[in-house]
Image (cartoon, grey):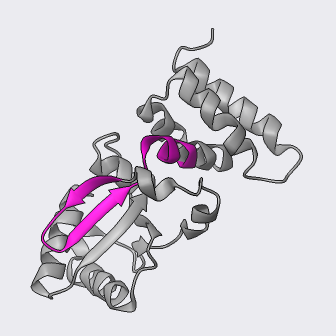
C-alpha cells in the first residue's frame, strides 16, 4: 500500500491535483507500520472525495494495472462513522503521510482503536488488526461501552463481550 500511496502522490502531483484526507482501516494501519498485510482500498473518513480526485484515482487504477486496484479503491465507505465518534475527534488526528500532493491523517489512537474494535465485532476479519494495535486492558475497558452502543440489536452487547474476551485472551490479559 505504501508504494501505491507514493506512486499515486506522484501521479496527482504531475496532474496538478492535491488530496487531503482522514483515512482509517487497514490502509491507515499499513501506512503507520502497525500491520503488514495487504489491502485493496483506502477508506477515507473525511472529507467527501471530490469528483476530480475520484476520476483521477479511477484513471490511476487503469494506468497502473500492476497494483490490481478496484475502480473505487479510494472511497468514502466508512463516512457514517463520523456521526458515531466523539464530537472532538478532529482534535486528535495524527499525520501519517505527507507527500507532494497527498496529505493523510488518521484518527487519534483511542478513536482508531474504537473504530477497529467495532469493525472486529461487526466482522471477524479485523481481529488480527486489533491484535496488532496491542490495546492495553485499560484501553479495551475504555472502548467497550462505545462499541456496545454502536448497534441496537439486543444480542449485540453479548457479542461484543465475546469478541473483547477473545482479544483479551489473545493478548494475554485473561487466562
* Camera-nearest residue between 41 and 50: 50
Q: Is residue 92 above or below residue 45?
A: above
Which residue is found at the position 51% from the left and 20% from the top? 171
Does the magenta segment cover residue 104? yes
Where are the magenta residues, as a range? 94-115
Q: Quadrant of residue 25?
A: bottom left
Q: Is residue 28 above or below residue 57?
A: above
Q: Position of residue 24 (x, y in %)?
A: 44, 57
* Camera-nearest residue between 113 and 55: 113
Q: Position of residue 21 (x, y in %)?
A: 36, 69
Does the magenta segment cover residue 86? no
Residue 125 seen by the camera:
no
- 122 vs 46, left or right, is right
Which residue is found at the position 39% from the left and 86% from the top? 50
Which residue is found at the position 49% from the left and 29% from the top? 135
* Camera-nearest residue between 161 and 103: 103
Residue sitting farthest toward the top: 175
- 155 vs 173, left or right, is right
Residue 126 seen by the camera:
yes
- 129 vs 4, left or right, is right
Q: Position of residue 141 (x, y in %)?
A: 63, 28
Q: Position of residue 130 (x, y in %)?
A: 50, 37
Which residue is found at the position 48% from the left and 31% from the top? 131
Q: Is residue 50 above or below residue 166?
A: below
- 143 vs 135, left or right, is right
Q: Quadrant of residue 15?
A: bottom left
Q: Quadrant of residue 47?
A: bottom left
Residue sitting farthest toward the right: 154
- Location of the C terminus (image quadrant): top right
Amino acid at each position: 500500500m505504501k508504494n501505491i500511496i507514493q506512486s499515486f502522490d506522484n501521479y496527482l502531483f504531475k496532474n496538478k491535483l492535491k488530496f487531503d484526507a482522514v483515512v482509517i482501516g487497514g490502509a491507515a494501519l499499513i501506512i503507520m507500520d502497525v500491520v503488514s498485510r495487504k489491502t485493496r482500498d483506502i477508506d477515507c473518513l473525511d472529507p467527501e472525495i471530490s469528483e476530480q480526485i475520484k476520476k483521477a484515482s479511477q484513471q490511476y487504477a487503469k494506468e497502473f494495472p500492476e497494483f490490481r486496484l478496484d475502480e473505487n479503491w479510494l472511497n468514502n465507505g466508512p463516512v457514517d462513522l463520523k456521526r458515531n465518534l466523539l464530537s472532538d475527534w478532529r482534535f486528535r488526528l495524527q499525520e501519517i503521510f505527507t507527500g507532494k500532493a497527498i496529505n493523510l491523517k488518521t484518527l487519534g489512537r483511542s478513536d482508531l482503536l474504537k473504530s477497529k474494535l467495532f469493525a472486529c465485532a461487526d466482522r471477524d476479519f479485523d481481529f488480527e488488526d486489533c491484535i496488532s494495535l496491542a490495546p492495553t486492558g485499560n484501553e479495551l475497558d475504555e472502548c467497550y461501552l462505545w462499541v456496545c452502543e454502536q448497534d441496537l440489536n439486543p444480542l449485540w452487547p453479548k457479542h461484543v463481550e465475546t469478541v473483547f474476551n477473545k482479544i483479551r485472551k489473545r493478548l494475554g490479559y485473561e487466562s
